[in-house]
Amino acid sequence: MANGETYDVLIIGGGLAGLACALHLSKNNRKVLLVEKQQYPHHKVCGEYVSMEVVPYLKSLGIDPFSVGAKRIGNFEISNHKGQLLKTKLPLGGFGISRYAFDAMLYNAIKDKVTLHFDTVDTVQYHDNHFEVITQGKEVFKADYVVGAYGKRSNIDVDQHRKFITEKTPWLAVKAHYEYDFKDDTVALHNFNGGYCGLSKTEMDTVNACYLTTYKSFKEFGNIEDFQKQVLSKNPYLKEFFQNAKPLFKKPLTIGQISFDKKLPVENHIFMIGDSAGLIHPLCGNGMAMAIHSAKIFSEFFLKSTKKESYSRLDLETQYTQLWNKTFSNRLKVGRNIQGMLLHPKATNVGFSVAKMFPSILPAIIKRTHGELLV
């Protein structure tokens, strides 16, 4: 069924990037349609630590994570496979909040300001300088611009023939909430053979445990419980956690085929934000902040550029690509390099030895994966 309206911007995906972008544009009187496949609120596979860098921007949108009990986090711990531990202060600090609560906050802020449609986008067609977006429910929407904010991978990537979607990827992510005595002010990253697990407290006083591993490591065991007992628990900190933490989900959430390959910020005239444009390795603990930051840079750039009397779509696409790369490409590169080291035990042990001798190295590395305050 065709919708007769034409929207200024149609956003595919209502995660943090899509919601923040919709809120920002709507506050500047743009006609926005947000298409999201799931009703709110819901849990997502995600580390739930967010860098403090995005707090000023969130406040400018009227969003205060601390109003719902987000935990202030200032300390970072990391252990290698053997359980050797390094500790440091986070340069900016951050906060812990569940995606369940965070997405709900943003959704409640936009639900009366933008048009929302809950459905799965099937195809995106561009012709004559306009878009037609067709959903699985056979709705047809028209828009001048489309923003892809649909996350790590989607059927839209297949529809748009994005290069990375054809490449096999070895990564699997698992996430659940637990009842466990864990420090409110700390985010921890514990390595194991074939991956790493992040722990942090949420606004509900639960601990979010989210780990990334390879299919090669996982398939030998075939189920999550055995894998956690046989592989993760070789790290003494993870052994202590999974032996004593009380699971609060009926079963963990999982997502497969996660790709850290390079992606283009604009493809087939669709502006990509968040994980759709580039996924930082979870070990850097900053994917949620990057998603929000990407919404800010796109929204500000788009609003400023389209206010001009004369502008071209090609110029917008070229300039946005340059802006994205300038803002995020170095972070992503650092993340890939760190992951490459941590997945090799010998290199990790050398890195830990050096970091113990020179304590300033660890906060310096963290700073390279985080941005400045978004004022």
Image (cartoon, helix red, strand yellow):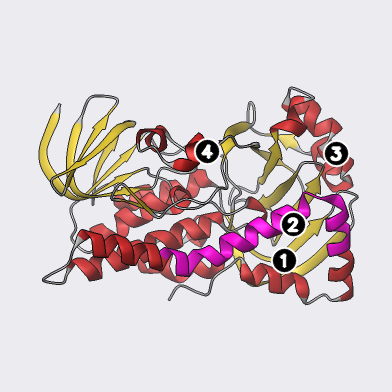
User: In the rendering, at what x and y percent does residue 375 appear?
Assistant: 43, 76
- In the image, is residue 349 part of the stretch drawn in magenta? yes
Judged by depth in the image, the label closer to the viewer, 2 or 1, is: 1
Marker disc for residue 183: 2
What is the span of residues highlighted in magenta in the rendered image? Answer: 324-351
Q: Residues within 10 Å of mark 2 (few under 14, many from 20)?
A: some
> In the rendered image of this protein, does residue 230 appear above or below residue 330?
above
Marker disc for residue 75: 1
- For the point 35% across and 38% down, which residue is it? 160
Q: Amino acid at mark 2?
A: Lys
Q: CA distance from mark 4 to mark 2?
A: 22 Å
Q: Amino acid at mark 3?
A: Ser
Q: Would residue 137 be found to the left or right of residue 311 on screen? A: right
Q: Would residue 368 be found to the left or right of residue 125 on screen? A: right
Judged by depth in the image, the label closer to the viewer, 3 or 4, is: 3
* Tag 2 near tag 1, CB within 8 Å: yes
